[in-house]
Amino acid sequence: MLGRTHYAAEVNEKIEGETVTVAGWVHRRRDHGGLIFIDLRDRSGLVQVVAEPAQEENFRQLDRVRSEFVVTVEGEVKRRPEGMENRELPSGLVEIEPHRVEVLSEAKTPPFMPQDAESVDEMLRLKYRYIDLRRLGLLNNFILRDRVLMAVRRFFHDHGFLDVETPALARSTPEGARDFLVPSRLQPGTFYALPQSPQIFKQLLMVSGFDRYYQIAKVFRDEDLRADRQPEFTQIDVEMSFMTQDQILDMMESMVHFVFQESMGVTLDPFPRITWHEAMEGYGSDKPDLRAGERLWNLTKVVEAHVSWPILREAPFVGGVVFRDYQPSRKQLDIWTNMAKDLGAGGLIWLVKSPGQTRSSAGKWLSPEEVKELADAVELQDGDVLLLVAGEKYPSLGVLGQLRLEFARREDRLNEGWRFLWVTDFPLFEWSQEENRLVSAHHPFTMPHPSDIDLIETEPLAVRSQAYDVVLNGTELASGSLRIFQPQLQSRIFSTLGLKPEEIEEKFGFLIQAFQYGAPPHGGIAFGLDRMVMLMAGAKSLREVIAFPKTARGVDPLMNSPSSVALAQLEEVGIQIKK
């Protein structure tokens, strides 16, 4: 076999006249006036090979190749004829005149061509993922992913972090998403769990004195899937000792700045920092998209002072979102009204300001003076629209936040750029309607806000945490917190979550015990690597940045998994399948 000397993209006018050997897949074959043209594709791009009939053996070899055949070509780099250049390719000014051609592997006609894959049904693409991955656009996602990982490792190495692997077989934890369980053959009736996070292990590493840890960790969660979720995914997992929250945020922000600069040549602005309360009040979301226009308006006090209509006046909260420079038709206003109802609002009131008048859908109940008070409160100008929602505070804010985002998307008002921010001071607990109990908003190892520790037993829903998220363009990119390191406080949190002393001992006794042998203050964070690369690449789904992903139903069409196993395998681990 001929050994490759150059990638396709390295063949250019700078090496004109030299002899090179290229190798790859036949991207396209064309016959023109007795000449055979081959576009040869490798992971770097395309290069053109041209053979004449006078080159008998080489012409014969190229005459029999078809799309996706694997070949090597040795030949001379020559200038393309004038007018035949392709300046969109690095190799577009030259071509290769073959001296020797080897067909290494023939190919059946693929179910789809790589260059046509984007228009092909996704299930078919995933079944033949090795063909789908030949797409240069998809390949570029993985080149970017590699650059991101190299930058991450370089940053942490330069800042004194140790790369430590934690176990992939651990015990099931009672908090968080469902675990993937692994039966133990040697301990019948017991199960490992694949890790949802290296959380406890990295805290134990801090107790061990490792001080600064990171890991590119594969984690597993048995949960319903979305475009930005997979049952197995990769985290940039980090933990640090003896650092304040501000120090951790500064360090991690520096890491993100370094990664974007090194992998994409992008210089980021400093990240704003807002509290969870400010995020919900201003944007109706704990992961606000700062590209989508101005903040929401809290009009509760304006209504109390100036509006007499009971529907608004007696509502616990009245909020608004303003669409600037927007003159909708009545049909469009009805669409927004129906959308608000679909999102859970009891109704929606609109105000439309145009020269000389301000119209309102509540004109029967609001006087012109009251309409003017509302319009003036949000600085409504001619050509602006105000949408009002009244009701319980946080559900109403959520509706308004969704309307804000949807308007920006529909009207192409999402500003360009990378809009990062930190969101801090999340609630420590939240009430689960499904489980009818308190649950951790982050996880049960999160440190409460020092000012709120006395409220843990008496007003748990009022307790703030020392937790923080990184948000990019409306997507949560990372989540972290300072951790509890005092055994008494950790036991109080477990008790507040409803765990009895014997349950705490059974499930977390080893952690409480470790804290009794000298635990440092510590905190950390975990970035979703797949999600980060997805956003950086402008991809629409995590499946475009994971080499062999699952479908939305958690299925791998390529390997046909999950699959049944032999009865003997089940008997070995003491499992029977209930039908």
Image (cartoon, grey):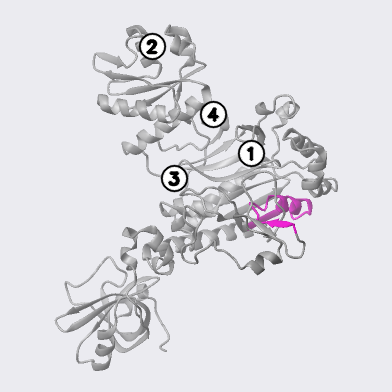
Mark 1 belongs to which amino acid?
A: Ala
Badge 2 crowding class, 10 Å Cα cut-off, few under 14, some 14 to 19, many 20 or more, is: some
Mark 3 and mark 1: Cα distance apart in space: 23 Å
Q: Residue at x 43, y 22 (%)?
A: 346
Badge 3 crowding class, 10 Å Cα cut-off, few under 14, some 14 to 19, many 20 or more, is: some
Marks 4/3 in contact by CB < 8 Å: the verdict is no
Mark 1 and mark 4: Cα distance apart in space: 15 Å
Q: Residue furthest left?
A: 33
Q: Residue furthest front?
A: 579
Quadrant of the rendered image containing residue 84: bottom left
In the displayed structure image, the side of residue 321 where residue 189 appears, left or right = right
Q: Residue at x 19, y 89 (%)?
A: 53
Mark 2 and mark 4: Cα distance apart in space: 25 Å
Looking at the picture, does residue 359 appear above or below residue 549?
above
Residue 237 in view of the camera: yes
Residue at image mark 2: 373
**SS class, disc 2:** helix
Range of magenta residues: 189-215
Could you tell me residue 149's position as x and y percent?
Answer: 54, 60
Could you tell me residue 544's position as x and y percent?
Answer: 43, 58
Q: Residue at x 32, y 29 (%)?
A: 335
Mark linked to residue 278: 4
Residue at image mark 1: 467
**SS class, disc 1:** strand
Could you tell me residue 459's position as x and y percent?
Answer: 70, 24
Mark 2 and mark 1: Cα distance apart in space: 39 Å
Nearer the N terminus, badge 4 or badge 3?
Answer: 4
Nearer the N terminus, badge 2 or badge 3?
Answer: 2
